[in-house]
Image: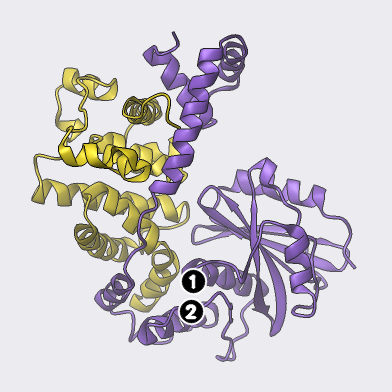
Chain colours: A purple, B yellow
Amino acid sequence: MTGDDETLLLLSAYCDGELSPGEVLAMERRLAAEPALRAMADRLRDLSANLRGTLPGPAAPEALRGRVVQTIGFVDAAPDRRWRGSWQALAATLVIGIAVGASIGGGAVYLDQRGAAPTMGEAVLASHLRGLAAPQPFDIASSDGHVVKPWFNGRTLVAPDAPDLAEQGFPLIGGRIDIVAGKPVPTLVYRRDRHVISVTVVPATAGLAEGEERRDGSTILRWSVGDLTYWVVSDLNTRALRNFVDLFQSRITRQG
Amino acid sequence: MTTLARARFSQLILPRLDEGYRLARWLTGDATDAEDVMQEACLRAYRAIETFAEGNARAWFLTIVRNTGYSWLQRHRPRTVVFTDDLDPVARAALDTGGPSIQAPETPEAALIAHDDARHLTRAIETLPVPFREALVLREYHGLGYREIAEVTGVPVGTVMSRVGRARQRLLEQFPRDQR
């Protein structure tokens, strides 16, 4: 019988990937030896799968957003020099969305009519956040790189490879078009648990080296391959995001 | 200054309203109550947003939602919520290690919907004690790691592991072995 309390707790933590390496080894040895324990692990995994279907429940009512915005008095926000550009655009997009009560589709439009050209990093971050605020963070939903890549053809400057990293825990969930520096560029959207990862691909700009920065809870990483620069934005923890970048880099071949 | 605060609010909080709402709903067990909690949590977050520097905005906001939800429960339904900090050590240990099991009431209604897996599961989750339920929701819905859950709920990581495990154990007990 494998039902003793401590075993179940350890097994539950094992399924969450929360055991120490030593404990994992011990657990895997036991799993190999005890069929009843394997059956229990299967039941835990099934339970998790069922929970993921059940727990989301209904979404927040649209009116809630409106009321919150009203409470904060954000609607009459005056322009602010420091954040002109990205926040203005983001705010404008959200306010319009709320005022009209329309559900904005996934078509990410970066409003840059204020004249103050945001840096590329700001534009990429704003698009990512805009994606999170929309009903879904992508224009085309697909976990198949062979669907996503050709979808970009003719719509954006480049059509990047879209490796599926589902086996490594980063499933591809779709793609969207962002506007960066006035040009439509492709963004691949990945997921890690509840975290969304945006990979925006732009033509490389001279003098833009590899970099990493944190801004208001999001991590932004960038690197260049050939004549393309990849920007990765997520609120995933930095270590996991670097791990994602390593996997992604190892899977993309050259770009034209 | 307020403009900056509003800009940060629209960037950090508005995209996470939905996620916060779902946590509030599981905490209060009611859609309308969850909206009240969210209104208050958003106001709290807005007032505190200047003090939030860098870091995990998501965990930060979920912590506010969670704490607002707890004080809401304490105000409106003092008997449904057990504040583990207020318990004596023995009772607290009992809660963290399972203790006397709180089974779902076997009402005729419960029997009727027993075959409806999703509703059955929902009911089973709703009957979990609040500390177990929140740990489970933060893990399975919000996808937080044990360490992040420990931060949000203000308990040690070991307690989180135990609560998530206990919550699952209780749910499994309510599903016959031959079912999925």
Across and down, in percent, residue A148 comes to: 73, 65
Q: Residue at x 60, y 48 (%)?
A: A238
Asked whether disc 2 touches disc 1, contact meaning CB atoms under 8 Å apart, the reply is yes
Is the residue A46 above or below the residue A215 in the image?
above
Name the mark on residue A107: none
For label 2, the crowd category at 10 Å Cα-Cα, with few meaning under 14, some 14 to 19 and many 20 or more, is: some
* Quarter of the figure with the C terminus of chain B: top left
On the question of residue B180 being in view, the answer is yes
Question: Which chain is mark 1 on?
Answer: A
- Residue annotated with mark 2: A104
Q: Position of residue A154 (x, y in %)?
A: 79, 80
Based on the displayed image, in which of its 4 quarters is residue A78 positioned?
bottom left
Circle 1 crowding by C-alpha within 10 Å: few under 14, some 14–19, many from 20: some
**Among numbered discs 2 and 1, the one appearing first in the sequence:** 2
Q: In the structure shown, which secondary structural element does the residue marked by tag 1 occupy?
A: loop
Please name the residue that numbered disc 1 is placed on: A134
- Tell me whether marks 2 and 1 sit on the same chain: yes
Please name the residue shown 42% across and 85% down the image.
Answer: A96
- For badge 1, the amino acid type reads Ala
Residue B153 in view of the camera? no
Compute the Cα span from label 2 to label 1.
6 Å
SS assignment at label 2: loop
* Residue sitting at x 49%, y 57%: A217
- Looking at the rendered structure, the kind of residue marked 2 is Ile
Quarter of the figure that contains the N terminus of chain B: bottom left
Going by the image, does A197 lie left or right of A149?
left
Using the image as rendered, state which of residue A155 and residue A238 is in the foreground. Answer: A155
Task: Point out residue B70 in the picture as x, y percentages from the top left corner.
Answer: 20, 46
Residue B151 vs A131, above or below: the answer is: above
